[in-house]
Image (cartoon, rainbow, N blue to C red):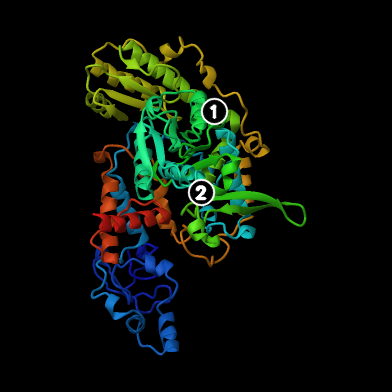
Amino acid sequence: MFASKLSARKLAVKDISPKGLNINGNANVKLVRGNIQQYKLFSTAKPFSPLDTFPRRHIGPKDEDIPHMLKALGLKSLDELSANNVPKSIQASRPLAIRNDRGEKEVLEELKQIASKNKILRSFIGMGYHGTVTPPVILRNLLENPQWYTPYTPYQAEISQGRLESLTNFQTMVTDLTGMDIANASLLDEATAAAEAMNQCYNAHKKQKSVFYVSHLCHPQNIEVVKTRAEPLGIKVVVGDLNTLDYSKGDVCGVLIQYPATDGSLVDFTSYIEKVHKADALVCMATDLLALTVLKSPGEMGADIAFGNSQRFGVPMGYGGPHAAFFATKDQFKRTMPGRLIGVSKDTAGNPAYRLSLQTREQHIRRETATSNICTAQALLANTAAMYAIYHGPKGLKEIAERVQQNTTILANGLSKLGLQVTNGPVFDTIRVDLGTKKAADVTKALVKRGINVRQFSDNEVTVALDETTTDKDLSLLFEGFSEVAGTKLNFTPHSIAAQLAPVNLGSLARSKPYLEHPVFNKYHSETEMMRYLKKLENKDLSLNNCMIPLGSCTMKLNAAVEMIPVTWPEMGELHPFVPVDQAQGYQEMFKILSQNLTEITRFSGVSLQPNAGSQGEYAGLKVIRSYFTR
């Protein structure tokens, strides 16, 4: 790379002259004649230093601006400015030991090399994370579009009409599929949404009932986050079989159910929910949006709160996030619902006008009356999920769900033919396989050899969770791996099983109520229609594409394009969060580098990368302080 303004242009032979060279008006560039292969350029810039460094491209003041600003302040240097304003007790005694001399191209090349250390296998692990296809029109025109990823949190409704309309679509999608009365504009992830649901149950009983029941068939991460959040609040979490939990003491504020369960089992909870309500407790149901296109909704069963992860609606897995959780509840609980709610009014001309109707905190700081410390929404990813639903429409979503369910049924039938015991009763996308005397570790090993991950559920059980990306080849490889461990001859194919299958009968669990009937979900099904709709919404919004944004706080508006590019690389996006660590060495290296850099910047002994938002960072910090005083 030439250390001059010629950096983006190769030096042609015709440019070479023994008389020297004046390039783009830079008289400081001199040419030394010698062997053609050994020509060198010299300039006032550092030799071979990149010109696309982050400070050069993204920090406002230019080198020539700084002396003028210092002169206006009566100062001689930036060091003097810092010394006069930063207390000596917190001034750094040495420069940061962090490289800042690399250009964007070099950084991307290095990151690509690190990302290549991740091993991308077909992951059928489930647990709320699934392979998905991001429609290209949404990938390019929304997820990778600065008009959508740079806007600030939409506090200023009048300049955020496009995003607010899209988030209203997200809320409509969630209320329709969950069968609930009202939904917020998204939360952070399913596990923290579970904790928020517990908190809502606790508040609904004015903190007088402090026991919260959790089904042992909930996803493990949901159980763990609920426990973590419950302890400082004085809530007692009891994890167990729903059929054995005792409500006779009258101290239960709520119960958490996973539907479908973490092992894929399906139960109609209608009668159980009636029992819980008779004990004056609330029911929270963690659920799956795609499953709800064919399954009876939580609202139909009588649940009070429904939540989950919208990731499988077009958002890459990304080794765990970020993803937009959804959260819906009955109308009577709307003022204690966490997050924010988008509403629709009319302006003076009678046109629809979107606004922030309810927020649990932030600009309307409620202090001790706040029902949650979550003040944001995963707007970009919630919008991606909403557009996925709009693009496919109710018919398309149901077709995807039915294909997933059919492939799962084919898998279950095939494994039964191999002599293995699988989930009894109806399933959607996940089956639990009892291997008898065989070891689950042997199955996972046999399948990893074939490029597939499944979940080791116990010593002799695995679960397999299929998704919209599952192919006939995947099913064949699954059958091969199980056949090898079971020691049973494989004498069938996915097609031969499919030809003999009867239609799936869900009985009382079958969905009967329509969904996504609003016109927006039934008109933008071609790429050009979707592209134009996205552009129409863009034109109603303010972003860095238009002007400077004066607000600060938590937003992606300051993320450079070079920082956003890797988000949609397959090496980053297609990794399931629960793959074996040896398949995620690229991510592990990134975590190590980031931790080291943050430790260097903050000068603390160590840092945590666990909190997924400022609100969760607050909890993490308070937990550390509390642990210090209670140890």
Residue 363 visible to an observer of this rendering: yes
Residue type at tag 2: Pro
Local secondary structure at mark 2: loop
Q: Nearer the viewer, residue 323 or 461?
A: 461
Local secondary structure at mark 1: helix
Within-10-Å neighbours for mark 1: few <14, some 14–19, many 20+: some
What label does residue 301 carry, if any?
1
Identify the residue position indicated by label 2 in the image: 338
- Residue 326 lies, with reference to residue 301, above or below; the image says below
Instruction: Report how far apart the C-alphas of labels 2 and 1 lie in the structure.
Output: 23 Å
Residue 496 at what x, y percent from top left?
A: 41, 11
- Residue 479 lies, with reference to residue 34, above or below; the image says above
What label does residue 435 carry, if any?
none
Q: Quadrant of the N terminus?
A: bottom left
Residue 159 at what x, y percent from top left?
A: 62, 59
Residue 140 visible to an observer of this rendering: no
Q: Which residue is outermost to the bottom? A: 74
Residue type at tag 1: Met
